[in-house]
């Protein structure tokens, strides 16, 4: 894995009470911005409650974003598979695969907000059990099988897809993980990718990284599948500016509502962020290691730390947020694309080496240039019979 991919994980996070139409429009504009900057992929979340993560259907958002972009790959991050009829999930994703000409990816999970699943009569234990059943059905359908099955929520009778995926043999599928082995277990069993959403969100998530890969390899060996580190994605939080002081000033714009959402609204205990005021919040991010509020050098150090802890992975996904205003947020993505991504994609070293080689021979070549100019000047004078 010589080239580390970079992308974003867009929940999204928008402060409750603002204009949702404009907030979603900013999300689409972000996709265009990332596409121009050369980011590899973006994963879009599905949520239905709590007023902050306001994209209910990532497939619809992806369809809109695909029309505005050219290169970036777009995934559901994640489809809450336990909420849906698995036949329709597979069917919609195959359609998206055709509409995007192979730029779509399917990320699946049980759903992270209990306030979502409660509205359809499911609790967190139900959703995790349904994920196992529904994922198996989706994969069978994508292989072209006919499926007859009874789950707790749906009945399928000789169900099959009428279209083959555009991507051969199918688009990429990844399973979400926070700290528990549930995601790695399913990914290993089916030979799928892994989305480590909790890679830096908690100390447990960071400490579990190497263990997650061990679980995947053990399950793959048990079921005779193969897993690939290139299909492993780690999600982390960053805001980058020219100086650490500027980065801290930038995030004063919107870090507090983000913290309050996890502290007081979302029933998502894995995200145990701490901090009573702005300074404490910024200090917590920096001191706990859950993210970066700093410079490109801080961002590079965080990526190296994750590579070391995990043993290697395929993509670094930046958790999208609005800690800073749109201009500073866009600038952060630009700085990362300009200075961090080349470090891990094999593009920084060749230009540095070329500059070093040129520097070593500069004096000799500069003198050769001066000698050549003098020689041609003398030659011209001779031809034109010019006398001093």
Image (cartoon, rainbow, N blue to C red):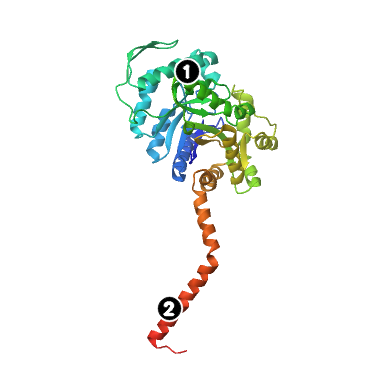
Of label 1 and label 2, which has the lower sequence position? 1
Q: Is residue 211 left or right of residue 173?
A: right
Instruction: Say above or below: 342 vs 322.
Output: below
Residue 188, x across and y down, in percent: 48, 23
Q: Residue at x 36, y 30 (%)?
A: 97
**Residue 284 is at least partly visible in this image:** yes
On the image, numbered disc 2 is attached to which residue?
376
Task: Classify mark 1: residues with Cα within 10 Å, few (<14), some (14-19) or many (20+).
Answer: many
Residue 339, x across and y down, in percent: 54, 48
Q: Residue at x 46, y 20 (%)?
A: 189
Q: CB of mark 1 within 8 Å of CB of mark 2? A: no
Tell me which corner region of the image, top left, top right, bottom left or bottom right, holds residue 31: top left
On the image, numbered disc 1 is attached to which residue?
131
Tag 1 secondary structure: helix
Q: Residue at x 47, y 45 (%)?
A: 37
Instruction: Say above or below: 66 vs 185.
Output: below
Residue 82, x across and y down, in percent: 47, 18
Task: Classify mark 2: residues with Cα within 10 Å, few (<14), some (14-19) or many (20+).
Answer: few
């Amino acid at each position: 894995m010589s080239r580390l991919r970079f992308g974003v994980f867009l929940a999204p996070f928008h402060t409750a009470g603002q204009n949702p139409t404009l907030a979603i429009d900013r999300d689409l504009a972000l996709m265009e911005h990332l596409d121009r900057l050369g980011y590899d992929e973006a994963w879009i979340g599905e949520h239905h409650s709590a007023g902050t993560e306001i994209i209910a259907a990532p497939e619809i958002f992806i369809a809109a974003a695909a029309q505005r972009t050219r290169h970036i790959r777009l995934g559901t991050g994640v489809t809450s598979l336990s909420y849906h009829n698995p036949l329709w999930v597979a069917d919609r994703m195959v359609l998206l695969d055709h509409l995007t000409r192979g730029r779509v990816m399917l990320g699946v999970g049980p759903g992270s907000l209990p306030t979502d699943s409660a509205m359809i009569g499911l609790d967190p234990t139900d959703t995790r059990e349904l994920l196992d059943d529904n994922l198996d059905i989706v994969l069978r359908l994508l292989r072209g099988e006919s499926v007859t099955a009874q789950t707790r929520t749906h009945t399928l009778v000789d169900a099959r897809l009428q279209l083959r995926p555009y991507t051969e043999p199918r688009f990429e599928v990844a399973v979400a993980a926070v700290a528990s082995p549930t995601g790695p277990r399913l990914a290993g069993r089916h030979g799928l990718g892994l989305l480590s959403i909790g890679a830096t969100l908690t100390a447990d998530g960071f400490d579990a990284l190497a263990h997650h890969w061990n679980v995947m390899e053990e399950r793959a060996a048990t079921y005779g599948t193969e897993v690939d580190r290139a299909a492993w994605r780690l999600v982390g939080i960053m805001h980058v500016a020219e100086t650490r002081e500027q980065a801290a000033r930038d995030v004063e714009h919107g870090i507090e509502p983000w913290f309050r959402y996890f502290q007081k609204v979302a029933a998502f205990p894995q995200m145990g962020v701490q901090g009573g005021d702005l300074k404490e919040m910024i200090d917590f991010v920096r001191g706990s290691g859950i993210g970066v509020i700093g410079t490109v050098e801080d961002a590079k150090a965080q990526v190296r730390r994750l590579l070391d802890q995990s043993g290697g992975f395929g993509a670094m996904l930046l958790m999208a947020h609005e800690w800073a205003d749109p201009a500073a947020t866009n600038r952060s993505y630009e700085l990362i694309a300009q200075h961090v991504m080349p470090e891990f994609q094999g593009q920084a070293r060749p230009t540095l080496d070329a500059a070093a080689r040129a520097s070593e021979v500069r004096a000799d070549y500069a003198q050769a240039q001066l000698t050549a100019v003098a020689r041609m000047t003398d030659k011209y004078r001779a031809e034109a019979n010019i006398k001093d």
